[in-house]
Image: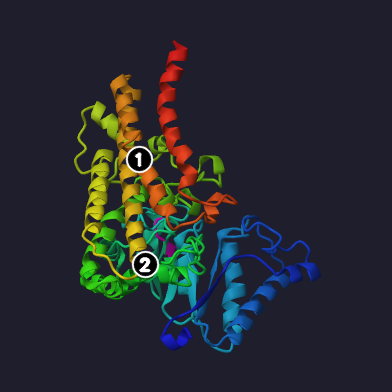
Amino acid sequence: MAKDRGIETYLVTWNIFVSESFREHYDPNSISDEAFYHHGDGYSKKPIKQYNRECVTQLINEYPDLTGVSTSLGERMNGMTPEERQKWIEDVYYQGMKDANRPVKYIYRAPFTIDPSITREAIEKNDFLPEPIWLELKFNWSHAYSTPKLRITHGGRSDKLTEYWNPDPKNYKVAWMARNEDFFTLRWAQPDFIREHIKENGHYYVGGYFIGSECFIPAYDYSHSRESDHFQWSYAFEKHWLYYMLWGRLLFDPLTPDEVFAQELGRRYGQANGRPLLEAYSAVSKMPLALASSFLTLWDFTLYAEGFLSTDTSGYNSGKAFISLEDLLNTKPIESTYLSIRDYVNRKMNQESTEGFVTPIQLAETLEKGSQHGLELLSSIADHDTPVLSYEKADIEAWAYLGFYFADKLRAGVCYQMYLETGDESERQNALQWLESPHAIKHWDDLIEVTSSHYVEQPLMHLGNTPFSWKLFRPQVLGDIDFVCGEKKEASQNQ
């Protein structure tokens, strides 16, 4: 079906693994993904290489409509030198593709611990793979929905990445992996961000983008109440149709006007509603981008923007999932033009200029204006005979409340940091005011109310076995107030 529709399909694998049956009958020391954790030392003997090589060949021969294969030089390869890893890929995957009865395309997932020159040599010396070979690079690690500027990739800063395209590639094109680990439930639409992303990164050596998530599969929709009359789809990708339409149409032609998307919204929900719906989405959908740009994001679990969550950078930590005020004070923005709360307060204290930077206060004002504008647009949307419209509007409301919440939390952070620097009690009181009702806690309560109307507790990999809901984290929202109050209590006890 995919091939008939002009869609290319690839099977992407990780290394070095065997089946549990192989392990049982041939080598009890080999690694299967059923019995072992995916990270760890590499283990490979001649039969393991033969097994994997023959699997590659058989896969290609068995499925003639499969476009190509891909693999990663990362998992279960610890302890191997970069050269050993590359030689393993050549002996197994390259040879397996050569032994197949037809040529296939190849996606080379750029290794994050190997010098680019080694990877380039391995790609450019091959003489049998169809061109271009796709070199996949993670854009801003696992959180592409941040800044459209390349600031970080898997494993660290992006400084050495230029060696992948300087000098010009001979037989490959870069394909950005735009990972979304930040919003799975709420509908999202921000066409200008996608346009800017393509404009900023659509260089001559770039062949396109991969769009998707690792922590979310848009198949069975487990987030909605099945009893709601608005539930009129089978799969999550049908609910998020606008998200995929935006990427698809704008990657094909970045000059595609907003009117195209507004008309499609209008076709579904009434023509008069198309434009205000798109503008409302665009206004409030900047919230996750702002959070990811102003927060240090690394691997998958380090940010889940729609839940305002971040686990420990080295692994899952259920006790610290929610992004507290303390976390905001301690973080460093991934976007270099953003000032952290502490840097901003230090500049203010030292009377240094903030020109050319986005300050936390400016970001808060932008978030608040976007949220207000989104809610104002919702009031102009007429009723329509489909119940789905009311829940499109509810998602816009949810993003707006998240924007309000983040804005007030930034303001509270600035006030609290000023209190820490100066000891001025009025600054601590200002911080408390921003955290209390009618500000941050009220916005979170509004978020709980609008999402509880149709969303149920749902599984979220970031939380392990704990189901996610916005209501679950209300105690942590209140915890910020305790944190600010606690500083005074500790100071009093030490006097």
Q: Label 1 vs label 2: CA separation?
A: 26 Å
Magenta stretch bounds: 137-141
Q: Is mark 2 on a helix, strand or loop?
A: helix
* Callout 1 touching callout 2 (CB < 8 Å): no
Query: How would you classify the magenta stretch by its main secondary structure?
Result: loop
Residue 143 on the magenta span: no
- At which x and y percent is residue 84? 60, 63
Amino acid on which the number 1 mark rests in the picture: Lys
User: What x and y, as percent, mark residue 483?
Assistant: 43, 29
Residue 477 lies, in percent from the top left, at 43, 38
Which residue position holds label 1? 442
Q: In this view, does 37 lie to the left or right of 158?
A: right
Q: Where, by quadrant of the figure, is residue 200 drawn?
A: bottom left
Residue at point 44% right, 24% down? 486
The quadrant of the image that shows the C terminus is top left
Going 24% across and 62% down the picture, which residue do you hit? 381
Assess disc 1: are there few (<14), some (14-19) or many (≥20) residues with their C-alpha within 10 Å of its C-alpha.
some
Q: Answer with mark 1 or mark 2, whichever residue precedes in sequence.
A: 2
Amino acid on which the number 2 mark rests in the picture: Val
Q: Which residue lies furthest to the right in this view?
A: 25
Residue picked out by circle 2: 388
The circle drawn on residue 87 is none
Is 367 above or below relative to 327?
below
Q: Within 10 angstroms of label 2, few (less than 14), some, or many (20 or more) residues? A: some
Residue at the spot 47% in from the left edge and 43% down from the top edge: 473
Residue depicted at 44% across the width and 28% down the height: 482
